[in-house]
């Protein structure tokens, strides 16, 4: 289980998270929704220890990671696979090298069967073995996301963090990725946290949906509850309306 307890994170005068409470029980898929810049990616980075909270605590399987030393933190980070926003593949490495990048550090024993591992993970995300030799520049956006997912699951993590897995994809490819998230969930029995703006995706893949607004979690509910809630913040966000309590900055004179 992952827990954020009263987590605060600021960057200078930018107070991004101001008391975030969130629990992700094992086996669930929790989706975090919220406007651009509300701190969704920052929340994921707190969970995996890439950022530390200024105040509050982060627990992974009961271990408080917010103050762990690097070597202990590294042990906890092995439990995580991270599909970064925009896939973030290394352009100079082949697909196979990208997939194995984390495995080398996190689970070196798996490197003995590196070729088999790459083929297995590519097949799991619906890509042919020949793709292993290609460079990221030779891949479509959808293929890049798949390779990013293959890399995220290569070291057999318990937790998978997906940062905007469907952004920038056409609706059909986005749904292919949704199906992959569900398939990975059932085949590998992982716990997933998904960050997305894509409500179709959120409704399809989530056990629960949490909305981040103004530095806090303002709502948590099932997909059904998210669609029927009276919470005006959630209602405005899921219907994509510019009218409501959520104010977007608008340049004067435009
Ligand atoms: N390492 C950092 N240094 C300084 N500021 C940062 C850093 N990381 C994030 N921020 C700031 O924190 C805020 C939240 O960023 P975050 O990336 O979490 O937003 P987000 O909710 O993921 O947005 P988007 O939907 O656009 O990806 C932004 O104002 C961002 O500029
Ligand atoms: Mg983000």
Image: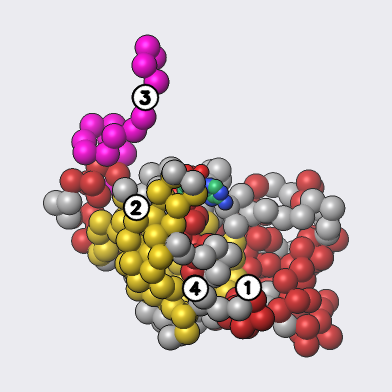
Dots 4 and 1: beta carbons under 8 Å?
no
Q: Considering the image in quadrants, where does the N terminus appear?
A: bottom left
Q: Is residue 214 visible to us here? A: yes
Q: Earlier in the sequence, mark 3 or mark 4?
A: 4
Residue 157's place in the image compared with 236, above or below, is below
Q: Where residue 146 appears, x then y in whole percent?
A: 64, 60
Q: Seen in the image, is 195 located left or right of residue 114?
A: left
* Residue on which the image places disc 4: 66
* Residue on which the image places disc 2: 215
* Residue on which the image places disc 1: 153
Separation of residues labelled 3 and 1 (CA atoms):
40 Å
Q: Earlier in the sequence, mark 4 or mark 2?
A: 4
In the foreground, 119 or 207:
207
What segment carries the magenta color? 238-254
Separation of residues labelled 4 and 1 (CA atoms):
24 Å
Residue 71's place in the image compared with 121, above or below, is below
> In terms of image quadrants, where is residue 208?
bottom left
Q: Seen in the image, is 89 located left or right of residue 22?
A: right
């Amino acid at each position: 289980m992952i827990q954020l307890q009263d987590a605060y994170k600021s960057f200078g005068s930018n107070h991004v998270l101001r008391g975030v409470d969130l629990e992700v029980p094992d086996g669930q898929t929790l989706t975090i929704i919220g406007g651009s810049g509300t701190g969704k990616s920052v929340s994921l980075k707190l969970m995996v220890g890439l950022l530390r909270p200024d105040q509050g605590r982060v627990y992974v399987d009961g271990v408080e990671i917010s103050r762990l030393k690097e070597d202990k933190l590294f042990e906890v980070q092995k439990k995580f696979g991270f599909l970064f926003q925009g896939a973030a593949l290394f352009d100079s490495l082949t697909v196979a090298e990208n997939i194995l990048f984390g495995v080398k550090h996190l689970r070196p024993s798996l490197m003995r069967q590196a070729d088999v591992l790459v083929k297995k993970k590519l097949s799991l995300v619906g890509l042919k073995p020949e793709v292993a030799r290609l460079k990221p520049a030779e891949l479509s956006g959808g293929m890049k996301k798949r390779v990013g997912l293959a890399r995220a699951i290569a070291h057999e993590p318990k937790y998978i963090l997906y940062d905007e897995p469907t952004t920038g994809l056409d609706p059909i490819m986005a749904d292919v990725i949704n199906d992959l998230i569900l398939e990975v969930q059932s085949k590998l029995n992982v716990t997933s946290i998904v960050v997305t703006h894509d409500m179709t995706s959120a409704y399809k893949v989530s056990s629960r949906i949490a909305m981040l607004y103004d530095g806090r979690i303002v709502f948590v509910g099932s997909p059904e509850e998210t669609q029927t809630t009276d919470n005006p913040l959630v209602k405005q966000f899921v219907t994509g309306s510019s009218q409501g309590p959520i104010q977007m900055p608008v340049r004067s004179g435009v």
